[in-house]
Amino acid sequence: MYKKVIKPILFRFNPEPVHDFFISFGEFLGGFTLGRNLVSLFYNYRGPDISKTVDGIKYRTPILLSAGFDYNGRLSRILSALSFGGEEVGSVTARPCAGNDRPRLTRLPRSKSIIVNKGLKNDGVEKIIARLKNRPRAENFVIGISLARTNDASSATLPESIADYAFSLRRLTEEGVGDYYTINISCPNAYSGEIFTDPDSLEGLFQVLDKISRANPKKPLYVKMPTSVSDQTFKELLAVLARHKVEGVVIGNLMKDYRKINVHDASPEKFQGGLSGAPCFDRSNELIALTKKEYKNRFTIIGSGGIFSPADAKKKMELGADLVQLITGMIYEGPGLINAICRSLAVAPRR
Ligand SMILES: Cc1cc2nc3c(=O)[nH]c(=O)nc-3n(C[C@H](O)[C@H](O)[C@H](O)COP(=O)(O)O)c2cc1C
């Protein structure tokens, strides 16, 4: 039904208003019992227990919505009904961001991908704290918060950028909002680039963040890793993180290898931003395997990038992912994908 009827209609429209519509509709449905029950009837997983406890946090299912979809934290009441065990809200920044110039999202249907040049559009940490604080949510539905640095000239330098991340993390922990936090160092379309994918800068960032995260030992800290870097750089970044209070890594973010785009996809005249979806799959898997091989169980691994089927999710778990995240697969395959993954995990041997 979704792929044959709904998707062809949705794909006729610009992706950003479609995204905005689903945020408003999802928030509306999540706001009352009947709306939640209705969605649950069609999409909720009700099979054998596939819950998982990771870094002391119990997830009802090990499938999370990736950062970037619910960037303002408006869907936390409905996502459990779609079988998600949690979500990553954000990326959230210290101050509100208007985002980059439009068009910020471009579908590449033949490549099963989206070019994302959103530029961290979000309401800013204070408004998102106010929205999420004391908002009821389903049992064992986990809310992680992804943090990025404000996308404007106010956080262009290294010290300003570190202070920007530290402000958001401090405010969230002070208010007790969020079950875990992910430091997004790999947004490919923000002001002054990915400055923390340099190991020395990353060291400077975590010397500051350590103080805040050590004061909040029950809130795991993860890092959203870049994938368009060499294995050598990736290993150097992991070596920095291993010295700090960082429980895990999300592998990984959007990728920038435009050669992965199918030649029949109409692409924008000027490429800006990163690719989601299928082009991310292989590189994400390689880096999950590399991390597991080098660090065994030192890091929790959250696998993200190009999950379009239960087999894709299982592949990441077999390589070492403790949890998986997705966005683009849900857009291309429909919201039933999450339930399908859950059902397939229920019949697979547990890791
Ligand atoms: C529209 C969109 C916006 C995104 N924004 C963010 C973001 O703000 N922060 C972040 O860490 N990742 C962001 N991402 C990357 C996703 O979290 C994810 O890592 C990536 O899309 C690969 O997963 P997928 O193939 O399942 O979409 C975004 C992705 C999409 C499609």
Image (cartoon, grey):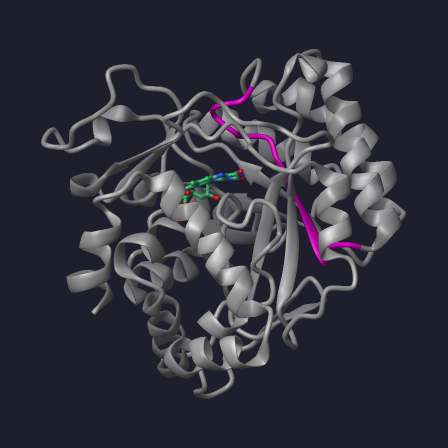
Q: Say which of 245 and 306 sits in front.
A: 306
Q: Does the magenta stretch include residue 189?
A: yes
Across and down, in percent, residue 309 comes to 28, 62
Residue 127 visible? The answer is yes
Q: Which residue is drawn at 52% across and 76% down?
A: 36
Q: Say which of 203 and 250 sits in front.
A: 250
Q: How many marks?
A: 0
Across and down, in percent, residue 238 comes to 59, 35
Q: Say which of 214 and 158 sits in front.
A: 158
Indicate whether 342 appears above or below 296.
Answer: below
Q: Is residue 98 magenta?
A: no
Classify the position of the N terminus by image quarter.
bottom left
Most frequent secondary structure within the magenta stretch:
loop
* Residue ranking furthest to the left: 264
In this rendering, position of residue 31 left or right of residue 288: right
In this rendering, position of residue 116 left or right of residue 90: left
Q: Residue at x 53, y 27 (%)?
A: 99
Q: Which residue is drawn at 56% across and 68% down?
A: 30
Indicate whether 49 appears above or below 106.
Answer: below
Across and down, in percent, residue 323 comes to 51, 60
Q: Which residue is drawn at 47% across and 60% down?
A: 25
Indicate whether 130 appears above or below 265.
Answer: below
Where are the magenta residues, as a range?
177-190
Residue 335, quarter of picture: bottom left
Residue 191, quarter of picture: top right
Across and down, in percent, residue 327 comes to 41, 51
Indicate whether 297 appears above or below 165.
Answer: below
Residue 78 visible? The answer is no
In this rendering, position of residue 135 left or right of residue 74: right
